[in-house]
């Protein structure tokens, strides 16, 4: 038996695309091609990131110069910056990368339910536009960063609030449809031999995140419906006197009271695992354990639903209870697996690894400050301590952003057929790390000094300097984003960078077995899958069959020696 599917009928069928596929002509507006849909999500999310970064600079400018923005406008801008970063950028870019990469990783030529995912994109796109409009036309009554219910207005909700509710509903429905398509793809479209325990880490993380999205997003939509009833019809569902209103708000509408906020990190863990193993040039020390840790992380995110009402005053969001804080355990164990894999492999530096290291640095920064906050007994000021903003920058925004951009640099050669510029990527990684770290520390130190979030009057010169540090961090983040987008434009639109080739890294997983960029049908021929790293084991088996020494992949049951023997080697 050979390592590739070599039956004559399969060779004849796969040497060229099926006629029906070859003749399909679709525009970007009606496409069902997972690669185009993925790019639509990525490009749109980056546009929203630019908007969120600009608004973030305005928020920071108000902190440094109190007269620059009014207090009312500050709350509006802060709500937009926080929500747009999480919903319109981070969630969407991960969906885009997964839509492009996951079918290739599991040996599929297409998505399951591609029209469902296409509908999800357009729902997200339209919802994002309405979302931006809602903040332009007036003050939104209630935001997903508010930890306590917003009182009803007797059925006199303004246009901004109505648009905001409709926008978030459309965006959430879009993500729900995309999750349904991605979940079904991993479950039903794996190639022959690709058992669930052989699925690459990024595809597995996408499966877990999609499952949690399918559970959690309807809860958020229910909360939006209740909020809309209160605002439009003068209901009292979220009135302070209504029993249970605080718990319902906390677990349906409040951003940090739902598991969704952890999914950004969850998918990033899968991407980082594939980045590390690819450039270490060996599979994870224990692939099954790695998948298990990612699954445990996903399961622990659901403990956010068990938190009591008191966490609305918590400082250390989103890890405000012991149960939720346990997500650090599988994350730490997975990092140890990365280090062990790199130590036993043949590491070769790639700029995407720098983004992983930077994310690790921010996780350590957040963990250290969480311990310090507990030791100093930092008060929440009804959840409005400046410390909270530091933790959000260091843990909620920073690591997922770094890992998402690192994923673009890692899979960029496959997506665009050209390498993104390593120097630009390294500079962007350093700027983004420095920016998130500076913003985080600025707000952390303000929290230790007892400063509530948004307070700019009666500050000492030291406290003003801390606001300046946070604003300087925001400027560094914006510059890093600008460098990344400029590099993508130069590579994707102007064909800059060096041609990458089909397998520039000697990759481990199936996406590196097709051309760069891939054809519409995905693969001319799918390699046979007998392990979690089919391409690495194929190369090792070929080396053993030729009389060479085993590489870092190793032998044993199911290893290259066994594969070589079964192939006649």
Image (cartoon, grey):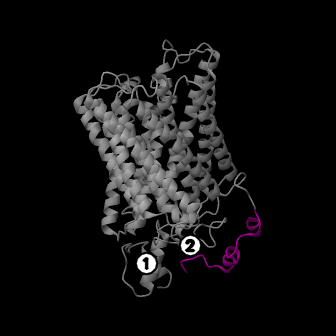
Per the image, the residue denoted by label 1 is 540
Q: Is residue 297 positioned above or below 242 on the image?
A: below
Q: Is residue 230 above or below residue 513?
A: above
Residue 140, visible in the rendered structure: yes
Q: Position of residue 491 (x, y in %)?
A: 54, 62
**Residue at coordinates 46% horizontally, 39% vertically from top-left?**
261
Q: Which mark is residue 336?
A: none
Question: Residue furthest toward the bottom?
Answer: 547
For marks 1 and 2, give the CA distance: 14 Å
Q: Is residue 327 left or right of residue 154?
A: left
Q: Quadrant of the N terminus?
A: bottom right
Badge 2 marks a residue whose secondary structure is loop
Q: Nearer the viewer, residue 435 or 204?
A: 435
The quarter of the displayed image where residue 277 is located: bottom left
Local secondary structure at mark 1: helix
- Image mark for residue 527: 2
Is residue 415 magenta-colored?
Answer: no
Give coordinates of residue 59: x percent, y percent.
44, 33
Residue placed most toward the observer, 268 or 325:
268
Q: Which residues are magenta?
A: 1-24
Residue 365 lies, in percent from the top left, at 30, 44
Q: Which residue is drawn at the image coordinates 29% and 34% (left, top)? A: 465
Q: Quadrant of residue 550?
A: bottom left
Question: Residue 22 in magenta?
Answer: yes
- Mark 1: give few (<14), some (14-19) or many (20+) Cα within 10 Å: many
* Residue situated in front as seen by the camera: 482 or 384: 482
Pick whichever of labels 1 and 2 is earlier in the sequence.
Answer: 2
Q: Position of residue 184 (x, y in %)?
A: 61, 51
At a point 63% along the width and 38% down the height, the residue shown is: 129
């Amino acid at each position: 038996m050979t390592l590739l599917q070599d039956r004559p009928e399969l060779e004849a069928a796969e040497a060229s695309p099926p006629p029906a596929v070859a003749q399909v002509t679709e525009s970007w507006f009606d496409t069902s091609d997972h690669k185009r849909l993925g790019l639509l999500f990525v490009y749109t999310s980056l546009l929203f990131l630019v908007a969120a970064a600009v608004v973030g600079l305005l928020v920071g400018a108000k902190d440094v110069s109190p007269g620059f923005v009014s207090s009312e406008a500050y709350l509006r801008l802060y709500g937009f910056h926080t929500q747009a970063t999480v919903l319109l950028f981070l969630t969407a870019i991960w969906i885009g990368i997964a839509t492009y990469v996951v079918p290739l990783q599991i040996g599929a030529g297409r998505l399951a339910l591609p029209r469902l995912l296409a509908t999800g994109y357009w729902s997200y796109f339209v919802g994002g536009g309405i979302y931006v409009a809602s903040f332009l036309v007036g003050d939104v009554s209630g935001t997903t960063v508010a930890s306590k219910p917003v009182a009803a207005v007797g059925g006199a909700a303004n246009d901004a609030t109505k648009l905001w509710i409709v926008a978030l509903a459309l965006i959430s429905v879009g993500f729900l449809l995309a999750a349904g398509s991605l979940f079904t793809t991993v479950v039903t479209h794996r190639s022959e031999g690709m058992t669930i325990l052989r699925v690459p880490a990024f595809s597995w993380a996408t499966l877990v995140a999609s499952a949690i999205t399918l559970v959690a997003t309807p809860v958020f939509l229910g909360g939006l419906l209740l909020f809309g009833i209160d605002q439009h019809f003068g209901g009292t569902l979220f009135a302070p006197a209504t029993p249970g209103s605080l718990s319902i708000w906390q677990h349906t509408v409040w951003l940090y009271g739902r598991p969704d906020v952890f999914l950004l990190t969850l998918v990033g863990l899968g991407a980082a695992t594939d980045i590390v193993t690819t450039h270490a040039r060996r599979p994870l020390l224990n692939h099954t354990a790695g998948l298990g840790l990612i699954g445990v992380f996903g399961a622990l995110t659901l403990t956010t639903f068990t938190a009591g009402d008191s966490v609305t005053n918590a400082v250390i969001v989103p890890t405000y209870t012991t149960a939720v804080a346990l997500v650090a355990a599988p994350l730490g164990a997975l990092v140890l697996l990365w280090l062990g894999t790199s130590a036993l492999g043949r590491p070769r530096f790639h700029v995407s690894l720098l983004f992983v290291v930077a994310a690790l640095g921010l996780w350590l920064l957040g963990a250290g400050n969480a311990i310090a906050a507990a030791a100093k007994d930092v008060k929440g000021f009804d959840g409005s301590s400046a410390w909270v903003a530091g933790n959000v920058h260091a843990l909620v925004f920073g690591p997922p952003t770094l890992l998402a951009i690192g994923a673009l640099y890692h899979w960029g050669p496959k997506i665009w057929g050209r390498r993104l510029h390593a120097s630009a990527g390294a500079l962007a990684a350093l700027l983004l790390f420095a920016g998130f770290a500076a913003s985080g520390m600025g707000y952390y130190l303000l929290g230790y000094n007892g400063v509530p979030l948004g307070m700019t009057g009666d500050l000492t010169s030291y406290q003003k300097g801390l606001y300046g540090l946070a604003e300087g961090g925001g400027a560094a983040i914006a510059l890093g984003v600008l460098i990344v987008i400029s590099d993508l434009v130069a590579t994707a639109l102007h064909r800059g960078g060096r041609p990458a080739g089909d397998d520039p890294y000697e990759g481990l997983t199936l996406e590196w077995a097709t051309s760069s960029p891939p054809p519409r049908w995905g693969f001319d021929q799918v390699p046979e899958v007998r392990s979690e790293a089919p391409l690495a084991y194929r190369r090792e088996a070929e080396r053993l069959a030729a009389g060479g020494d085993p590489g870092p992949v190793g032998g044993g049951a199911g290893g290259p020696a066994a594969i070589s023997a079964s192939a006649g080697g």
